Image: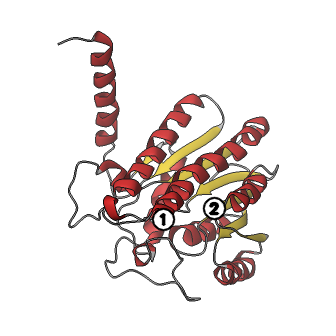
């Protein structure tokens, strides 16, 4: 958090990790642009952050699954003042793949994959030109759960696939930008105490007040703590609760072994 302050654009800011992260950034002196579908939630958070931190807060109501909404947010992400992008918006679309509604499947893909990519693409060139910037893409520990059966895990083929994309995209982008002044991170929380599981994502959770799904989970403050600490040490893959980075290193080693074997070919 030692970089010069500017404006942080936070998607999915109406509750959970997004709202908590926006609050923490504002407390550190960042102006913020809050993006979500629920106008009243954004207005309430904006008023609170202005009162508590004295920072400038914008609200931008947008559905990132809608091309027009995504375009408006991308234009703002490309602004000269944007120094921090938190790609946090996401929906789950949980359920059996064979029964997943096509419209909901498309929404999951648009928000979890296309929006993350498009907003990063909007923000990164300007950050590189200005010589500073941070991009944090929120994935999930379910990105690493591909072969595990459901129950107790959710039925998640599309959701898990999208979060796997976010992990690979972010790690590859970080490698591409290695040596640049930008900080790139993929944040992979496990079950977190938010309202994420109270909706499949076709419609946002109703009501003005935040709530927590019945399964509970890790407090959002701990997830934000982990992300900010990892940024300070330039960790690309942040898994809150993982105290030893050896599993992440082992993943990279396994990937190298697979690629090496493929280059050799044959048995």
Horizontal and vertical percent position of residue 76: 77, 56
Residue 98 seen by the camera = yes
Which residue is found at the position 34% from the left and 73% from the top?
A: 217
Horizontal and vertical percent position of residue 259: 33, 21
Q: Which residue is mark 2?
A: 64
Q: Which residue is mark 1?
A: 104
Q: Residue 134, labelled with which disc?
A: none
The one nearer the camera, 100 or 192, is 100
User: Where does the C terminus fall, quadrant-wise?
Assistant: top left
Residue 160 to residue 252: above or below: below
Horizontal side, residue 205 vs residue 53: left or right: left
Residue 232 to residue 60: above or below: above
Mark 1 vs 2, N-terminal side: 2
Which residue is found at the position 56% from the left and 67% from the top?
A: 18
Horizontal side, residue 168 vs residue 144: left or right: right
Horizontal and vertical percent position of residue 34: 69, 68
Give SS at disc 2.
loop
Q: Residues within 10 Å of mark 2 (few under 14, many from 20)?
A: many
Which residue is found at the position 54% from the left and 51% from the top?
A: 137
Which residue is found at the position 30% from the left and 46% from the top?
A: 244
């Amino acid at each position: 958090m030692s970089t010069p302050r500017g404006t942080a654009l936070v998607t999915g800011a109406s509750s959970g990790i997004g709202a908590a992260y926006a609050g923490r950034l504002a407390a550190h002196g960042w102006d913020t642009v809050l993006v979500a579908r629920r106008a009243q939630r954004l207005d309430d958070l904006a008023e609170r952050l202005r009162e508590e931190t004295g920072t400038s807060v914008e609200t931008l109501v947008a559905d990132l699954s809608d091309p027009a909404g995504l375009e408006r947010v991308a234009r703002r992400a490309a602004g000269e003042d944007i120094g921090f992008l938190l790609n946090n918006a996401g929906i789950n679309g949980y359920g059996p793949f064979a029964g997943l509604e096509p419209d909901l499947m498309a929404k999951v893909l648009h928000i979890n994959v296309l929006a993350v990519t498009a907003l990063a693409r909007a923000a990164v060139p300007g950050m590189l030109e200005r010589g500073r910037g941070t991009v944090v893409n929120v994935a999930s520990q379910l990105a690493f759960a591909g072969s595990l059966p459901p129950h107790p895990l959710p039925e998640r083929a599309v959701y898990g696939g999208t979060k796997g994309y976010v992990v690979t995209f972010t790690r590859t982008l970080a490698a591409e930008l290695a040596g640049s002044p930008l900080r790139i991170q993929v944040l992979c929380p496990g079950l977190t105490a938010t309202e994420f599981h109270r909706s499949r994502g076709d419609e946002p959770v109703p009501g003005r007040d935040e709530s927590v799904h019945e399964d509970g989970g890790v407090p959002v403050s701990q997830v934000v703590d982990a992300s900010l600490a990892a940024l300070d040490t330039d960790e690309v893959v942040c898994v809150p609760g993982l105290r030893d980075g050896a599993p992440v290193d082992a993943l990279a080693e396994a990937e190298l072994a697979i690629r090496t074997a493929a280059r050799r070919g044959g048995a």
